[in-house]
Image: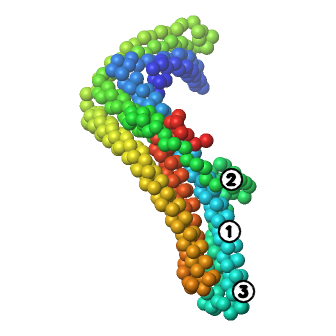
Amino acid sequence: SSAEWWPTLDLGLDGQAQRPETGSGDFARLGAYSGYEIDLWGRIGSRVEAERFRAAATEADYRTARLTLSAEVAATWFRLLTASGQLELVRSQLETNSKILDSLRNRFGAGQGERADLLRQEQLLEASREQLHISEARVQVLRHQLSILVGDSPLQGAFPTGDGLPDLPPLPETGLTADLLQRRPDLRAAFNRLRAADHELAAAVAERYPRISLSASVTTEENDLTDFFDEWVRSLAGNLLLPVVDGGSRRAEVARAEAVRRQQLYAYGQAVLRAVREVEDALVVESRQSLRLQSLQEQVRLSRESYLQLQRQYINGAGNFLDVLTALTNEQGLRRGLLEARLDLMENRINLYRALGGGTGAGELN
């Protein structure tokens, strides 16, 4: 677009030959032609600025995509760590349930247990095997997803399982709304599109005003090629173009550009409100999720104590195995739920960093 600020220069060569000759049949013309429009009303400048802001918006879109990809890689990585932890937990629970089944078989063989207790434990063992198959499949699927996200083949990607989810750093400083406008690339893209639409409107208004242009040419024309460069004709002209009747097209273009500018203004305002809401939502969810995590940890502790107490009573003949089985199933479910709750907290923190536009210089995840 900025090329319109520069003069144009064209070279032309025309020639023809007629046979049979009727007079002189050879003809040739050589010339250089130049044109330049004076940007009196800023039409060209407005279009150049509009394209400059569009280019800035496109760069911000790229940064938004990069931020989105980074967040998805991090979230998938934490899901893989959680799935690996779930797999280890299920294997441990499967081993525990198998040992309990062996103990029940011994008690049943000694006439100290009931057949129904044995069947219930066998059913729990099969349920643990089912969970094992589900967890193994989930780990493999997440490995494939992570491989694709980092640009590898799903059959070639190899990732260490790690030692579980890391501890969360302190909450980052969210700053003011003005800081958010500077950090988030999607807001910068929306703002640059608004500024581009504003300059497009200015260019549309300038289209209704007169145009002044200059033209110059240097040509030589001869019938005899031997005298081709003897005479040169130079010309310099100025043109004034004033639109008078155009069927209302220019006026309609101004109205269209104004509507687009309003549209971009509303889109930018909506994007700002959505960005503020995403930050506030993430902060609220994190505070409540942290309380939920504490509650689950306490439930796991209580369910463990309850299971051990009921198990002792059953061994001493003062309880029934159904209560023991219920307590064991509840404890194992709570432990799996605790891992999922930690993952939810981690994913919400990722959403918070994403809502803030990435790192803020404080409390960043490494």
Pick out the residue farthest to the top: 230
Q: Residue at x 42, y 11 (%)?
A: 236
Q: Distance between the Cα atoms at labels 1 and 3?
A: 21 Å
Amino acid bearing label 2 = Gly
Amino acid bearing label 1 = Ser
Q: Residues within 10 Å of mark 1 (few under 14, many from 20)?
A: few
Image coords of residue 134 (percent x, y): 63, 70
- Residue 54 in view, yes or no: no
Labels 1 and 3: the sequence-earlier one = 1
Task: List the residue tagged with mark 2.
Answer: 162
Nearer the observer, disc 3 or disc 2?
3
- Residue 239 in view, yes or no: yes
Amino acid bearing label 3 = Asn
Task: List the residue tagged with mark 1.
Answer: 92
**Res. 129 image quadrant:** bottom right
- Name the secondary structure under disc 3: helix
Q: Residues within 10 Å of mark 3 (few under 14, many from 20)?
A: few
Q: Residue at x 46, y 58 (%)?
A: 292
Q: Nearer the viewer, residue 144 or 354?
A: 354
State left or right for residue 204 relative to residue 24. Answer: left
Q: Nearer the viewer, residue 136 or 182?
A: 136
Task: List the residue tagged with mark 3.
Answer: 106
